[in-house]
Amino acid sequence: MSARMRWAADLVLGVRLAVGGGRTSWARLALTAAGVGLGVTVLLLAASIGPAREAKSARVAATAPSYVQDESAPLRVRQVFVDWQGRKISGVEVAAVGQGAAPPPGVGRLPLPGEVVVSPELLELMAADDSARARFPERVIGVIGEVGLPRPKSLLFYAGLADTAAAAPALGFGGEYYRQQWPLVYGLLVVAAIVALLVPLAIFVMVATRLGATGREQRLAAIRLAGGSRAQVHRIASGETLAGALLGLLVGVALYFAARPLARFIEVEGVGFFPTDLLPDPLLGVLIAVGVPVVAVGSALLGLRAVDIGPLGLSRRTEVPARRGWWRFALVGAGALVLVSISLTSDFWSVMTDPVVTLALGAGIGLVLVGTGAVLPWLVGRVSRGQVEGIAPMLALRGLRHDRNTPRVLAGVVVVLTGSLTLQVLLSAAADFTADSFGAGTADEGTGRWTLALSEPTPLRELEEAIALVGGVRRISEVRWGATTGGKPHGVVSTDCAELAHMLGVRDCAPGRAYWVHDGRDAPRPGTRTVLAGRDWTIPDYQVLIDTPSDSRLPAGLLVAGGADPVLSALRPYQLVVEGDPDAAFADRLLAATGRVDRAVRLSTGQSAQVELFTSLRSGVIGASVLLTLLAVVGLAAAAVDQVWERRRPVAVLAANGVPRRTLAAAAAWQAAVPTALGLALATPLGLGTAWLLVPSERFRVDWSEVVVTVGTAAVVVLAVSLCTLPALRSAIRPSALRTE
């Protein structure tokens, strides 16, 4: 027989052993397929995110107005954003002024003045809440189709526009969609997050392929006794593992397509997709189809290195040499050294913007995460050789000496927790830093000052009258802004003394008094004649402010108290500052009142798109961590049940010799609790310490409620594993388990 035929025959024998070994082999095969299938499902979902975002971007681009400078264009459009109870409703007010005006995708015809077309989610919202319906008094003439929605739960509308004075000309819909360029650190943090989340997933797949390893090794020992060589045994083991991996691959694909329709009902932090969007990237799909079986076979072969399979039986090497621990801690130390070097040589701005520094940041975090995952199995092996009092803890430690799957699954959980804690603190600091740098955060929620952003056609007097009728309003301040055009341009802000006193902390304000807030440029000379808003204007005498409230949102330039200068009074207000109650209910009443005048009036939350992006990434990291933790529950339960099943005869012997069932159940709980406690003790300080090395002390903030949730999730994992092993343990300690002894 040729070598190629011998290879094929050995692989086929391994497959036959996996599928034709009776109920026990079928149970092992089903357990392996279920574990691999869950991992493949998550991998396919991850591989679908890129194509799903592209499909979503294509729909957004198809609905974007195609703006032009030609006044003869057939459309006039005005984009509007409506805030309602913390939710953002976006829409377009449109009017046809010429021939050939086509409606946007998903809309049958252009709405006329007094008509509106809404998305299905907005229609349900309007039907369920009268205050939401009041924001859209027009007659609903249709519902937007899926082709015109970015996501299933989009809050979107198209309304007829009566006043086209402030609307922009457009040829139609389907304009070019410009993607915003984000800081390099965002991309690197995304990569770090993907690595931190996919590493434990790969560990879970490897552990799933090694379930039932003891029974497989006993069969291989019998084959060695029958004359099989070591190479032949390895090929047979590969075939047996390959059968479970391929079946798991099929199960994962089936679960993926079964779960895809649920995407329509799931949306997290404004991120959602249609089921048709979720199709894996072809290259990544092929990589998963090939990589999962390869990883499974490689994991099985690596597992055989710890077992000496000979003709007279098998023996397992349980001792972990002391010298094998140094490289694990060296990885953590090397990562910490990189991060310390970054913190000593660079400030946080360099971390946010310098490509070299951010690359070193990604490498340092990666080294810490990999080292953390490598330390836990070694640490569990060390602890398992300790001496303890009590039968249950002693049995648990003895069981951990032979249990290599549970520490590996928990190593993945520890990587998730460490990376999650690090990224949460880093992303919070990055969001705060971006907010301070770009002047975000102009809405002082909690202080009772609410900033309303006005659009060009907003009827100012009607708006102020509507606001004055809202209960709790104490003051309304108009904020005007203009830029001088003669000589060096300077920004000029004009508002009343009450608002200036709050912004600048001054007490000598009077109409016409001016103040200069340094903006890094030379101050203009008082008395200089310039042009402001198309009218001649003379720069007044001003007071240079040195000590101002430490607020990065403070406008720089020349601030003038209004009421004495007709040129400043002619500037149109771009903001209204309303002083009232500090609670969110007041904001809802305020928006309801302004919406009746002009629904384009918005509360200035001050969050830039970059701040929102960092916040959404932080939420995504938390959500993915929870998902992988739940997946770890399945992995831990499967590993624990497999451990009980493989050791059912020794456990039955203990029960037959008088060991109480409570003791055996407590030992199972201890066996799950010990590595979990070690993992938590390792992940929390390493995760927070990694972030502490990078984030400046004044920006280092820890949300301890999230840390408590993390610890609580780990406790739930232990409880779930313990509960899942009890039925298997109860079955194992029956006297019938000894019938073959």
Image (spheres, grey):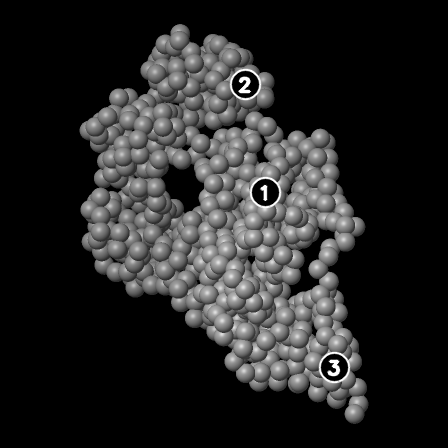
**Pointer 1: what residue?**
681
Amino acid carrying label 2: it is His
Position of residue 380 relative to residue 166, above or below, is below
Going 42% across and 56% down the picture, which residue do you hit?
Answer: 272
- Give the camera-side residue of 731 and 356: 731
Distance from label 1 to label 3 (Cα)?
A: 45 Å
List x then y, in percent, for residue 101: 34, 59
Q: Quadrant of the N terminus?
A: bottom right
Amino acid carrying label 1: it is Ala
Distance from label 2 to label 3 (Cα)?
A: 87 Å
Mark 2, secondary structure of its residue = loop
**Pointer 3: what residue?**
225
Going 73% across and 38% down the picture, which residue do you hit?
Answer: 337
Quarter where residue 478 is shown: top left
Please indicate, yes or no, whether residue 640 appears anywhere in the rendered image: yes
Please indicate, yes or no, whether residue 539 appears anywhere in the rendered image: no
List x then y, in percent, for residue 520: 59, 22
Label 2 neighbourhood size at 10 Å, few (<14), some (14-19), many (20+)? some
**Pointer 2: what residue?**
518
**What residue occupies the far top of the structure in this picture?**
508
Q: Which numbered disc, 1 or 2, marks the residue closer to the eye?
A: 1
Position of residue 574 relative to residue 292, above or below, is above
Label 1 neighbourhood size at 10 Å, few (<14), some (14-19), many (20+)? few
Position of residue 696 relative to residue 202, above or below, is above
Distance from label 1 to label 2 (Cα)?
A: 49 Å
- Give the camera-side residue of 137 and 427: 427
Mark 3, secondary structure of its residue = helix
395 sits left or right of 160 in the view: right
Q: Quadrant of the C terminus?
A: bottom right
